[in-house]
Image: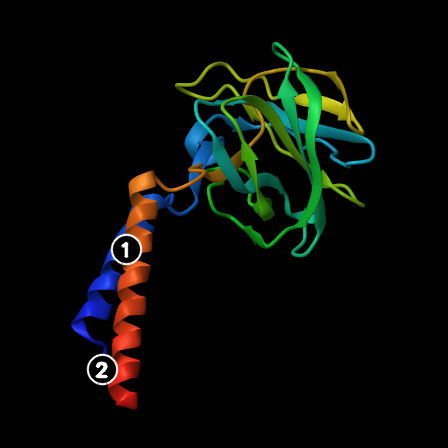
Amino acid sequence: MKMSRTIRAALAVACFVSLNGTTAFAAVILDHSPDAVGGTQSPAYANNATGQNFGDDVFTISNSHTLSGMDLYVGSQWASLGQSVTIRIWADGGGTPSTLLHDFTETISILDTDGIAGWVPTTRRAHVDFTPAITLNAGTYWIGMSGTNSELSVYTTRGASGSPLLDGKVAQFSGTTYSHMANIGDTAMRLYGDSFTAVPEPASIAMWGLAGGLGLVVARRRRKSIIG
């Protein structure tokens, strides 16, 4: 069955509105990977959600974002595909983590060597997707990934070339309670997400209505001609 020119035109309008009323695909919005930051690798920290665990140093977003995933650079001996990990996001309290905003579990879906630069061969990128994605308003936040029921190591960076001096330390927690070491940007990690658009523009909504109306008119005319 051939599609009429009118229907094709309506679908083209709908596709145009869709592409111009939504956000782009998820991208890296914060890159503290070894490849991006440089520097040398520090010894791995123990990292268990129920005990000693760590949150990446403060990061700031200037507009609303959806966070759709996260990488953490770990030792291969502590990480495995399908392993349960705990993600926690805190508000910033003037340079230290304060209110716990999100606390949820995901599973490691990718374990590879992407972005490890010249770090030791056993370094791995442990990737998780956030299901559903997390929406954050403009502001300053802290985020961490730790093993839910077992230890998941975390690597940090020292003395990155061309970056602020990194001392290999990272904010430490006991369970969900912040303990000490509020240093900036030392955890080897990445964040993925999009800028967030809540609703289409009013003009886009009107165009959707027009496209839908054209489709209905064509369908009714076609049905009438078949019956007649």
Residue name at image x 49 percent, y 30 percent: 32
Q: Residues within 10 Å of mark 2 (few under 14, many from 20)?
A: few
Most distant residue in the top direction: 94
Cα gap from disc 1 to disc 2, whole angstroms: 22 Å
Which marked residue is nearer to the observer: mark 1 or mark 2?
1
Earlier in the chain: of badge 1 and badge 2, it is: 2
Vertical relation: 83 (above or below) 116:
below
Query: What residue sits right under mark 2 in the picture?
Result: 2
Measuring from the top left, give residue 73's x and y in whole percent: 58, 39
Badges 1 and 2: C-beta atoms under 8 Å apart? no
Measuring from the top left, give residue 26's x and y in whole percent: 43, 45
Vertical relation: 188 (above or below) 131:
above
**Image side of residue 29 versus residue 104, left or right:** left
Q: Amino acid at mark 1?
A: Leu
Most distant residue in the left direction: 5
Residue closest to the eye, 17 or 214: 214
Residue closest to the eye, 115 or 89: 89
